[in-house]
Image (cartoon, rainbow, N blue to C red):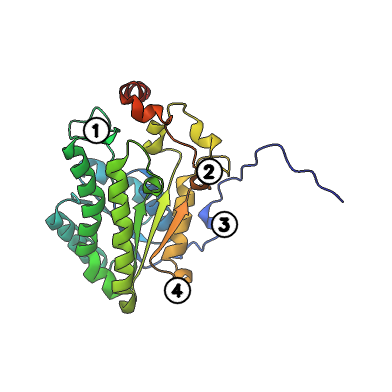
Amino acid sequence: MSFKPSTVQVTKPVTPTTATFRDDLFKGKVVLSTGGRSGIVYKMIRVMMAHGADAAILGRNGPENEKAAAQLSKETGRTCLPCQADVRKPEDLKAAAKKAFEKFGRIDFVICGAAGNFDPRADEGGSLAPIEGLSENAFKTVVDIDLLGTYNTIKATLPYVRESQGSYIHISATLHYRGLPYQAHVSAAKAGVDALSAVLAVEEGPRGMLTFFWSTRPISGTEGMAKLSPKGDRNNDAMPLGRWGDGDEIAAMAMFLFSDSANWITGQVFVVDGGENHVRVPQLPYPQAVLDPKSMMDRIQAKI
């Protein structure tokens, strides 16, 4: 029998984590996250709570953080503790980690998910811009949030995670794999996060701790890289698996890495992107984007 290759793009559906993992997989466990009130980290926390974990989510915006924690508790029937904290301030993170430990008696897992990549209109100095148009404040702000914020989170939680022989997940990106224009600040910061995670794995492995870092893009329901695609659906065209990822699929990777099945894996990077990084289609028209940045910025701002 001969089979003809399909000429139609095949896209597999999103599979719920309940189809693969036990409902009580994380019963008695506690996960702490930065950047957990929205986006993919919110979905990671929600899924882990749905499988039995309690959680603490940290964020600068106190009211919004409290709203997200209440929603997570309502959706899952577990306890989510909101902690107001700025990852650039070590004292905030230490206070939040202490508060979480006093509430739950343990911290098993930490997700370092706080990140910054600012709107071109933002006053704090962030923008999608080539290096010549990227302010020193923009570069510093993103490095402070992404890289220094990850370091501060590790420092604040390390004693608790050592005690539970737990695990860290650091959310990275694929930007620095290929010199993506307009993303010097985020690329530098995420490359640093990758290196920091690898060192943590080597230093803390003998104490029973595990650490992972992964790159993920693009994910439906998040702003992220959509701003970099003036043609709108261009990312779908470049996806071997035919569609953007779903936050629950990112959560499924967290489920596995935080489970006992991953006890002999550490210090590894996992690219969860539907194969997009292998295709390497430019997110911005090249070389026009770097030769005529003004016209490109006009297009990006119009899209926003």
Residue in front for this viewpoint, 99 or 4 = 4
- Residue matched to label 1: 132
Task: Please say whether residue 69 is visible from this viewpoint.
Answer: no
SS class of the residue under badge 3? helix
Which label's residue is closer to the chain start, 2 or 3? 3
Q: Position of residue 18 (x, y in %)?
A: 53, 56
- Residue matched to label 3: 19
Residue in front for this viewpoint, 77 or 146 = 146
Q: Position of residue 95 (x, y in %)?
A: 15, 59
Which label's residue is closer to the chain start, 4 or 1? 1
Q: CA distance from mark 2 to mark 3?
A: 30 Å
Q: Position of residue 60 (x, y in %)?
A: 20, 45
- Residue matched to label 4: 264
Q: Is residue 152 left or right of residue 266?
A: left
Q: CA distance from mark 2 to mark 1?
A: 28 Å
Name the front one of labels 3 and 1. Answer: 1
Which label's residue is closer to the chain start, 2 or 1? 1
What amino acid does circle 4 point to?
Answer: Trp
**Residue 158 vertical placement versus 303 (above, below):** below
Q: CA distance from mark 4 to mark 1?
A: 44 Å
Which label's residue is closer to the chain start, 4 or 3? 3
